[in-house]
Image (cartoon, helix red, strand yellow):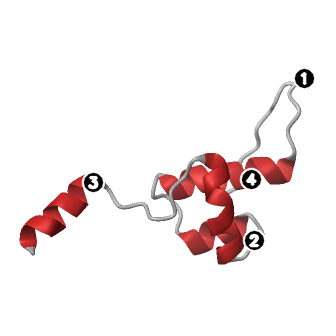
């Protein structure tokens, strides 16, 4: 699926940066795997993982509730 965004002319956005941002946020939301997000961004998995911090996205995306549940089972 292709998505076309119409951005006002006054906003200075680079297509590549926008794709990386959206990929990072979709990864954060659990909608994309790390590999798929990296592929969409045209980066290696390692390079994509390194830029996640630029978008305030954690590499390890494990909800606190799951951590507590796992700890309770140990």
The residue depicted at 89 percent of the width and 33 percent of the height is 12
Disc 2 element: loop
Tell me, yes or no, if residue 2 can be seen here: no
Q: Which mark is residue 19?
A: 4
Q: CA distance from mark 1 to mark 2?
A: 28 Å
Name the spot of residue 69 as percent of width and height, x first.
Answer: 14, 62
Residue density around tag 3, few if under 14, some if 14–19, many if 20 or more, within 10 Å = few
Residue density around tag 4, few if under 14, some if 14–19, many if 20 or more, within 10 Å = some
Q: Which mark is residue 10?
A: 1
Q: Nearer the viewer, mark 2 or mark 4?
A: 2
Tell me, yes or no, if residue 44 can be seen here: yes
Q: CA distance from mark 3 to mark 2?
A: 29 Å
Sequence order check, earlier mark of 4 and 3: 4
Q: Which mark is residue 43?
A: 2
Q: Is residue 54 left or right of residue 28?
A: right
Q: Quadrant of the C terminus?
A: bottom left
Sequence order check, earlier mark of 1 and 3: 1
Sequence order check, earlier mark of 4 and 1: 1
Name the spot of residue 27 as percent of width and height, x first.
Answer: 54, 58
The residue depicted at 57 percent of the width and 50 percent of the height is 25
Q: Is residue 1 left or right of residue 11?
A: left
Sequence order check, earlier mark of 3 and 2: 2
User: For mark 3, what is the residue?
Assistant: 64
Q: Nearer the viewer, mark 4 or mark 3?
A: 3
């Amino acid at each position: 699926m292709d998505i076309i965004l119409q951005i006002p002319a006054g906003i200075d956005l680079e297509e590549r940066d926008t794709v990386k941002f959206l990929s990072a946020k979709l990864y954060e939301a659990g909608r994309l795997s790390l590999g798929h997000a990296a592929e969409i961004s045209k980066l290696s998995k390692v390079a994509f993982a390194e830029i996640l911090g630029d978008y305030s996205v954690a590499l390890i995306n494990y909800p606190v509730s799951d951590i507590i549940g796992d700890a309770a089972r140990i």
